[in-house]
């Protein structure tokens, strides 16, 4: 059913409904490009050592 509906799927998704993901790129695809760029910039500034790992990795 999901494959049949794919042509009408929005490019962004609600992050809370991603479920199990295959990696950071699948999470990144849930955001507009400018937003994921900004989130990654904030992550580098705030958590350069990767201490905070709860939730989906970006």
Image: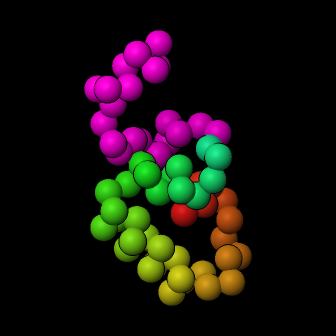
Q: Which residue in the rendered view is the most extreme toward the top?
A: 1
Say if 7 sits above or below 25 in the image. above
Residue 29 image position (x, y, % from top left): 43, 51
Dividing the picture into quadrants, the one containing residue 38 is bottom left
Residue 43 image position (x, y, % from top left): 52, 77
Residue 18 image position (x, y, % from top left): 53, 39
**Residue 31 magenta-highlighted:** no
Q: Which residues are magenta?
A: 1-20
3 lies left or right of 20:
left
- The count of marks equals 0
6 lies left or right of 19:
left
Residue lying at 61% horizontally and 85% vertically, measured from the top left: 48
44 lies left or right of 13:
right
**Residue 14 magenta-highlighted:** yes
Dividing the picture into quadrants, the one containing residue 53 is bottom right
Q: Nearer the viewer, residue 38 or 11?
A: 11
Q: Nearer the viewer, residue 21 or 14?
A: 21
Residue 4 image position (x, y, % from top left): 40, 16
Residue lying at 62% horizontally and 44% vertically, measured from the top left: 21
55 lies left or right of 30:
right
Say if 30 sits above or below 54 in the image. above
Residue lying at 68% horizontally and 83% vertically, measured from the top left: 49
Say if 26 sits above or below 33 in the image. above
Quarter of the picture holding the C terminus:
bottom right
Q: How is the image coloured?
A: rainbow
């Amino acid at each position: 059913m999901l494959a049949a509906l794919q042509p009408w799927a929005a490019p962004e998704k609600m992050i809370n409904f991603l479920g199990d993901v295959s990696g950071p790129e699948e999470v990144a695809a849930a955001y507009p490009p400018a937003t994921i760029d900004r989130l990654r910039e904030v992550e580098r500034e705030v958590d350069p050592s990767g201490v905070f790992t709860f939730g989906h990795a970006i």
